[in-house]
Image (spheres, helix red, strand yellow):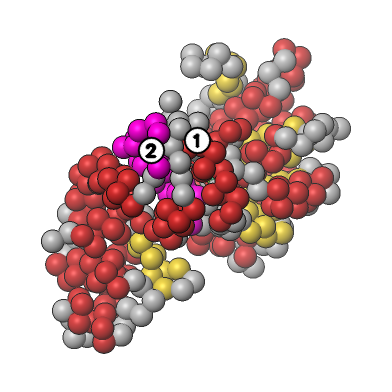
Amino acid sequence: MNAFKYGCSVDGENFCARPDLSKSLSTYVESGQNLVIQGERRIGKTSLVKETVSSMRGWSMLYADFMGVKSVTDVCNRIADALARFDSSDSFLRRIFAALVHLRPVATVDAMTGLPTISVDARASAAPSSVNTVMNAVEAHVKGRKACVVFDEFQDILDVKDGEQMLALMRGRIQFMPHTSFVFLGSARNAMMDIFMSPKSPFYKSAAVFDVGTIPDDDFFEFAKARFATGRRRLPRALFGRILDFVDRTSGDVQEMCDAIWQISEPGDRLDDGHFERGLGFVFDREGGVFALFLKPITDIQLRVLRALAVQGGEHPLSGAFLEEARLTNTATVRRSLTSLERTGLVYPGPSGWRFASPFFREWMRRRK
Ligand SMILES: Nc1ncnc2c1ncn2[C@@H]1O[C@H](COP(=O)(O)OP(=O)(O)O)[C@@H](O)[C@H]1O
Ligand SMILES: [Mg+2]
């Protein structure tokens, strides 16, 4: 049994309740307000929205995930699938089929879940205007119900060749559904900003911004303590504080670290710094190979900057101390290296300086000889 879960959205016993956020989120949804959810990666945006909306009595959720879509057909399929999952009764499925008939839909049963899925024909759905057809189907089916439409990894639509045109068409349809709350989530902060904050975008100012920050320390502690207790492990507050600091309070990384400590500990253990250290070792054993691959395309100078960042932190990368740590003399070199490193996705500029995307990689880098 695993007490901790990471790498996918969490619900039920794996979800640490966030009553304040859930309450304001459900209030917005009930009022038909469209929202764009903002927050760091792995902080818990998807989990919060799914858990909150699915527990709103009398409300149904249409959830479509656009992660990795590459074509108009992909986008249509994700929405068609969401519709099939929204309500899998025969009469409902028949209506979806009727609405999508021009896209030549086909129904199959998912071998894993036993649930019906719907896919549309690739040729029939090649033109961006196909999005109108699926959005019409959405409109027909949310009408008269209390429904919330959740579009996750929304920015990935921009990766499709006709992405901007599809966004404009979607926006056009959404405008005619004033009673339905659309909740947009994304992970690439800049791309989401372009969609919702740029005056040139059809979605400009079309949704209120809803921030998802870190889980309050005390709530997260009670949650983790109870999870560890299911395996008769005792979690002291101080050790949890160390975990929170180490992973910068990113929810998914907290759970990954707790899982590692769970893996290397035994029932009856009172967890301590020794477990923390062995937990880290567990993560490095598992992921060290991947971390080493990250470094392959990196130049020697970039490597020095990356290591200095791991050792010193990224608040003052242009300071004398930083330059010395990186054995460089020129701030322009540091700047250039950081820009190149950002493109690899390993680091990014946060509100209070440069940060590593993964605290485990940061620590691995710091200890590397
Ligand atoms: N409310 C929560 N309670 C406990 N863990 C959470 C919670 N929200 C997120 N997590 C952790 O973070 C991970 C990523 O959550 P997710 O909702 O996918 O984040 P995001 O959508 O912001 O990237 C989850 O797998 C889980 O480990
Ligand atoms: Mg997410």
Identity of the residue drawn at 18% across and 86% down: 329
Q: Is residue 120 above or below residue 164?
A: above
Q: Please provide percent x and percent y for residue 102.
A: 65, 25
Give the percent coordinates (x, y) of residue 30: 82, 45
Residue 279 visible? The answer is yes
Return the residue at label 2. 269
Q: Residue at x 69, y 41 (%)?
A: 52
**Camera-nearest residue between 313 and 173:** 313
Residue 2 highlighted magenta (yes or no): no
Estimate the spatial distance between the alpha carbons at disc 1 and disc 2, rounded to whole Å. Answer: 10 Å
Q: Which residues are magenta?
A: 249-270
128, above or below 353, in the image: above
State the image coordinates of residue 278 (x, y, percent, origin top left): 27, 45
User: Going by the image, does 250 lie left or right of 49?
Assistant: left
Q: Residues within 10 Å of mark 1 (few under 14, many from 20)?
A: some
Considering the numbered disc 2 on the image, is that residue within a helix, a strand or a loop? Answer: loop
Determine which quarter of the picture holds residue 101. top right
Residue 332, visible in the rendered structure: no
Q: Is residue 366 left or right of residue 163?
A: left
Which element carries disc 1, helix, strand or loop? helix
Nearest to N terminus: mark 1 or mark 2: 1
Instruction: Give me the disc on residue 229.
Output: 1
Residue 258 colored magenta? yes
Where residue 267 appears, x then y in whole percent? 39, 31
Identify the disc placed on residue 256.
none
Residue at horizontal 45%, vertical 56%? Answer: 238
Question: Which residue is found at the position 36% from the left and 55% from the top?
Answer: 358
The quarter of the rendered structure image containing the C terminus is bottom left
